[in-house]
Structures are given as structure tokens and as C-alpha cells.
Image (spheres, coloured by chain):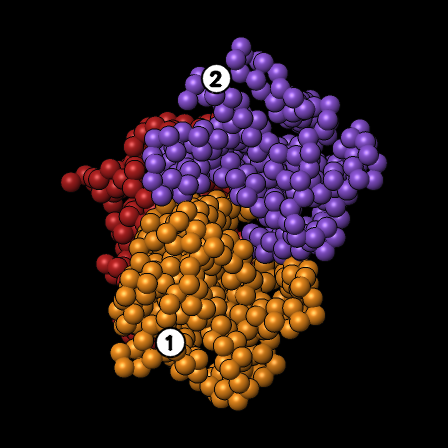
Chain colours: A orange, B red, C purple
Amino acid sequence: MTFLGRRGVLLLLLLAIAIVLPPYFGTYYIRFATQIAIYGMAALSVDLLLGYTGLITFGQAALFGVGAYAAGMLTVYGVTNAFVAWPLAILISMLFALAIGSLSLRTRGFQFIMVTLAFAQMVYYFAQSLRNWGGDDGFTVPQRNHLGFVSLADHATFYYVVLALLVLVVFVANRIVASEFGMVIRGIRDNERRVAAVGFPPYRYKLVIFVIAGGIAGLAGALMANHAKFVSPATLSWQLSGELLAMVILGSANSLIGPILGAAFFLAFRDVLSDFTEHWMLFFGPLLVARVLLVKDGIWGMLLRATGAGEVPTAREVDCPELMVPAPDSKPGASP
Amino acid sequence: MSEFLLETHHLRKAFGALIATDDVTLSIRKGETHALIGPNGAGKTSLVGQLTGELKPDAGRITFDGRDITDLPTARRARLGLARSFQITSIFDSFTAEGNVALAVQATEPHSFRFWTPAERIARLRHPARRLLDDVGLGRLGNLIASRMSHGQHRQLELGMALAIRPVMLLLDEPMAGLGIEESGAMSQLLASIKGQYTILLIEHDMDVVFSLADRISVLVGGRIIASGTADEIRNHPAVRVAYLGEEDDELDADG
Amino acid sequence: MTLALLLEQLFNGVQFGLMLFLMAVGVTLVFGIMRVINLAHGALFMLGGYFLMAALAWTQSYALAVPLALIGGALVAVVIEIVVLRPLYRRGPLDQVLATFGLSLFFNEAVTVIWGRESIPLSIPPFLTGSVEIIPGAAYPIYRLVITGVAILAGLLLYLLISRTRVGALIRAGSDNREIVAALGININLLYTLVFALSAMLAALAGIMMGPLLSVEPGAGDPILILALVVVVIGGIGSVRGALVGALMVGIFDTLSRVLIPLVIQTNATSALVGMAVYVLMAVVLLFSRTGLFAAHRG
């Protein structure tokens, strides 16, 4: 997937908007954009699993939350240097991902969804039980991390650091999905049976991408702890996992950029609607249903098509052996 | 060293009351093309599943090149040199034809935990893939997305992918399935050209192809091997004529 | 920890397990027959409680309110099935998960619009208050006994329905082969709607019965749904027997661990361990059998 031509221009345009627009509109929008970038990163990690590997995970919020807790706790303990704290947060999330993944990936389809959900709940209960860390209420993080001499207390500075990290993550993720490893992953999504038949043991490759995605989610979590200066079990909820999935689908799965746009859409939707009513979820639920039932494309896919910049390759329906009932007029899932 | 490459020993598999594989002992010689024929429902799918590792036998053993592979997972068997093509096309829909074969070529490497270089630009994967596409007759179609290929092209791709992993044995599950006259002829020629280079277990319904290619034939009916021998022996075997072909002697007599 | 107390907790565990069974059997039926993953199932549990409360306020009679609440749940289910689920039958798990997730978000918010965000306490029906001495020295609440009995009855009726009636035979046939049932001229759409409504009524029933014990609030169904899903993973997808065994295991294990673990381990981690116990059980079962204890046979 090379970034050339119209698609490249479109991406540069989006990047330019991200760089220039928020500060023009003021602090509130800078913070809003920061939130988009953070959730976009988390949603991207879900897309690596969903769009590229065909794994429907309802547990990514757990890894996001682990990163947040790790960064928050480290700050409270005095480890405030981002160059130390953030890699540590990533490492800890990767370890959790390794633990959760090694058990969950033994299952497929429906069971995998449920098992990831269940393990995420375990982490959630664990966080709730941490009396010294506020239990269900969470705890405030006294200060943001700093980059050596550079303080991140200023919202604008922090935003650009987050944005830079997001761009880096997109770049690295893109290399990964285009590499030999990425080919195996995509092969697993398209046809896991075939992947095994040519000689790749699928389990280990799935585990590795699961850990990588966990690390990215953990980084996003650490950034969230910095952004909100507050950490609570809510960041671990399965609702958040579901919302991340929704962001990926709304934005276009299997695209890396789509999830970021999906995050922007979700947060904007919430922001705009909650000015009118506290019951904005009443509209989001049906919106999600409508997207699944009626709309074939996500935002990025529509954007590419509208500008003639190509298409998002529609990934084959994700693997679920129990659902392989041959139906005469079945069509592949329209959503990704 | 045994003359047999793949052997099953008293293989048995039952699904509840249905006995899909009933004491199957099969021996495939190195270098031979061995056909497995039988009516629908005879248990070919279950047998193939057990040979490839997707199905666990209830009893019995499978040996490959002297080595017991009964408990080995599918991927390990592929790495030992047992390649298969699928009866119902099983490819990577979103990849190009060349990408499909290249991924199979990639599988021959010790591992694929390389995360940086774009796979599309790796010559040691793409060049052999292109050559293989030529070999199976898909030379010009390398850039076609697999999901947009025709059924016949899919069958060719299936074969290409099986060949790409540099196997010693091919398990071909109905390679002619769904092919028209011309395509069948081309596939038949293709198979004839690779015969001898690999040990082949060919599962087929197309009798012309079976009799023209097979060195030996085994007949599977109701989960049991009721006969095994050369083409002539099978042609004249009374149990086979009755069980498999019924009254249709014409099929067997067709090419004399 | 006296024996009486232990027995009481054991009974609670069985009772909770039976409630979970009502939920889990719905999930497993819907998935086994219609191949649909329904994350909105928890919402139906929650709506059971809310409908009971509303029907009580309206009719002041349990005799009327309970059936009304059940009918309400069935109606909601029918609408969901026709509008959202039918297009999803041919689709994959992702579409189903997201669409039903969207539904659950909607319902959780919808009840706050109508009834507010606060949790609403429901009292135990006056004619069912009090306790009974089932074992000398141990008094057990009548209400819990009654709902246990109702759950067992519901389970029996379900069993009879599925194994002894024509409809049940169709349900079982539809599970194995949709096309054949359709080819027989049976209206498969109607059959599916029926199955879904049935599963929803079971969930609503569980919600109605648990209402006075748990209290009615937005999102009340979610933790129950998750436990029901754990039950299905443990018991095996598509197996009613598995749902029963799994539900009893989870119910008893969860209830007992909440009581026993704090006795053995007294640290800050206690409540975490208690919450996690069921998932550890699930992990152990999975290590033992990848598809659960009674996975329905897919040849």
C-alpha cells in the first residue's frame, strides 16, 4: 500500500488540516484534536486486528487502560520522563496482550469475541479493586510526562507530540502490513486454512500481531493519561472496546487511516449532539446499526472514491467457522 | 528407506454413527501418481482431512517419508513437503494472483517475522512466483486480483500455490472440478507435465484423467478401500464395477 | 462459616445459576439455530425489569404485570428481529456484533429517557416475602425459592417444547439445515422470529425475577450478559445441556467465591480476585476443551 498519487495528496491534506486547524480555533479544539488523535491511535490498533487479521476483539480497551494505568502510576511514583514512562507503558501493555492473546487465540470466531471480552472484564475488575488507586473512581495524575527539557504541560505542545506519534504509528503500521509478516496476517484474514496449508502456523503470527496491536493501544492509553491527567476503570470498559470497533467500521476498516477518521467522527458526533441533548447515545446506536445494515463503505472509503483516489480493498468476511453455512444467496459482509 | 512415501495404517474416523473412514490402509510409492476414486459420500473428504491434519483420526497412523505425522498440525506437514490443493477453491481473495503464489513461496522460508521491507518488492519471492504462474498457464494474469479470476483460473492458481512450497508430494483434491472441456484439457496436460517430478495423490471423478495419469488407483467406497491396483486391474475388478460404476460399463471401456 | 450459611450460599448459587441459564439458553439457541450473535440480549433482561415496574405502576397487580412485562419483552424482540436481525442472517459476525452492540447502546439510553438514570428499587411481592426453614436452623427466603422453581419450570417447558413438539423439531431441523426446512414450505422467517421472541422472553423473565433482587437500572443487563456469554463459552455453543451445566457451574462458582475467597485471602486484591474468579474458571475450561464442555457437533 504505497502513499503516492491522489491518495498521498489526500493524506497530506489531512495532515495539513491536523497541523494547522486546531490552534487556529483555540485551546478547546486543540484538546479536542488531541483526543481524536489518541482514540484514533487506539482504533488503529483495533484495525490491525480487525481489518488486517480478521480478528474481532472486544478487549482492546483493556490494553488501552493498562497503558493509561501504567503511565499514571509511574508518574505518581515519580517516573515522569516520557522517554522512560512511555516505552514502559508500551511494554507492560504488550505483556498483558501476550497473556490475554496466548489464551484467547486458541479460540476462533464467536468464542474469540467472548473470550477477549471476558479477559477485558477481568482486567476491569482488577482495576476497580485497586483501592490505593481510587478503585472505581480512579485517580488523578499530578502532572504530564515531559520529554527531558520539553514540558508537555502546554496543550499545543502536547498535541503536536501526540500528532507526531500518531504519524509515526501510521507509518510503522503501514510498513508492517506491507511486509512479509503483514502478508501472512492478511492471508490469515482471507483464508486461515490456506495459510496453514502452505506451511505457516497461524497461531504464532496472530499472537505477534495481537501483541503489537496491544502495544499501540497501550501507547494511546499512556497518552490519554497525560491528556486527561486522570485515569479510571472507565478506560477499560467493554463499551469502549465496542466504541473502538465502531470507530474502525465507521471510518473504514482495513485502511489504518479510516479508524482515525472514524474516531474523529465519533467524537465530533458526541461533542455536537451533547450540546443538544444528554441522550446523544440514543442517536449513535441507531447510526451504528444503519451503517452496518445500509451503508457499504466507511468514511475513508467514501472519501477515496469521491476524489477518485482509489478504494479501500474490501476485506473478505472475517473468519467464523460456526457461521460457515453455505447459503445460496449469501454475500460477503458489506461493512469493511 | 521404504519405497513408500505416504502410508496410512488402519485409519479410522467416525462421526457418531457414521463411519467415514473404515480401516483405511493406503500406501503411496515415491514418484508415483496414485489416484483415489470413489462415489460421492465415500469418505474422500474425511480422508483428505486426516491426511492434511485438519481432522484427527479416531484410530490408526499416518506416516510420511518414514515419519509418523498423525499428530502433526497442518502447517508442519506442509513444511515436511506435503502440499495440497483444495477441491473448493481456497485462495487469498484480496491478493493478486502473483501475491497468492508469492505468499506460498514465502512459506518456504524458515519464518516470516520480517516487518520492514514491503513484500511486493522482494525479488526472491516475486520471481519464483512469476515463473510458477507461467508454468501453470497464468503468466499474464499476475496482477489480477484473485477474487476477480474465473473458476478455471482459480483451479490453475490452486495448483500453482501447491507447487510453490516446493513439496515432495502433492495431494490434489479434484483439480478438474468444474472445468469445461478446454480447461480440462489444459489442466490434464499440466498434470501430465509435472507427473514424475512429484509423488501425487490425485482425487478425481474425471475417469479419463484418472486412467491417463494414474500409475495405481485405489477405490474408496463407504469409507473402505475396496480395491487397489493398476488401471487395468481396477478396470476389470468386479467389486469396483458393481460398487462404483453400477451398470455403466461404458465409462471403463471408453478408452480400452 | 457455618454449614447452614454454606448451604444458603450454595442455594443462592444454584438460583443465580438458573437465572443465568435462562439468559444463556437464549443466547445459545439464537446462535445455534440462527447463527446470530446477539449483544442486545442484556438489554432484554434489563427491559424485563423496567416493564415489570411500569406494568406494576399501571395495574397494581402482579398477576397482570408479569404477563404484561413478558409480552412487552416479546414485542420488542419481534421488532428487533424484523428490523435489525433479519438482514444480518446472511452476514458475518462483525456485522452482527456491531449492529446488536448499537442496539444495546440505544436501549441503555432509551430507558434513561423514559425512566431516568437512577436505579429504581423494586420490592419483593408482598405475598412472597419472608423465609422458610428448609433445613433446621437455616431460613431461606421464599422469594428465592419461588424464582428457582419458576426457572426450573421454564427449563422443563423449554425442554418439552424442543424435544417433544413439532415446532421444536422444526427448530432443531432449522439448526442443521436452513435450506431444507425452507424447502419444506415452512416459513423460516416465522420460525426464526419465534425462536428469537422465545429467547427474549426467557431473558425478560430472568429480568423480571431478578428485578427485586438486583434493582432496575440502565445497563443492568450488561454484566449479566457477559456472564451468560461466559456460560455459553464454558458450556459449548449451541448446546442447551451445556448452557444448563455451565450456568450452574458459573452461578455456584461465582456465588461461593464471593463468600469464600474473602475468608481465605484478606488483602486489597480480594475484590479483584472475586470478580475474576469466573473468568479464571472459563480460562481453565478452555484450556481443557477449546470448544467448551458440550459443543454441538458440527460434522
Q: Mark 1 falls on what kind of element?
A: helix
Q: Which residue is mark 2?
A: C4
Q: Mark 2 falls on what kind of element?
A: helix
Residue A247: which quarter of the image? Answer: bottom right
Q: Which residue is mark 1?
A: A165
Name the residue type under label 2: Ala
Find the residue positioned furthest to the right: C59
The relative height of residue A47 versus residue A233 in the rendered view (above or below) is below
Percent from the top left, x then y, of residue C248?
Answer: 51, 27
In the figure, is residue C206 to the left or right of B221? right
Q: Is residue C64 visible?
A: yes
The relative height of residue B49 versus residue C62 in the rendered view (above or below) is below
Residue C128: which quarter of the image? Answer: top right
| Same chain, labels 1 and 2 | no
Towards the viewer: C85 or A331: C85
Name the residue type under label 1: Leu
Percent from the top left, x then y, of residue A148?
Answer: 26, 78
At a point 55% along the width and 44% down the height, the residue shown is: C223
Q: What's the CA distance linking mark 1 and mark 2?
A: 60 Å
Find the residue positioned furthest to the left: B1
At a point 28% along the width and 66% down the height, the residue shown is: A78
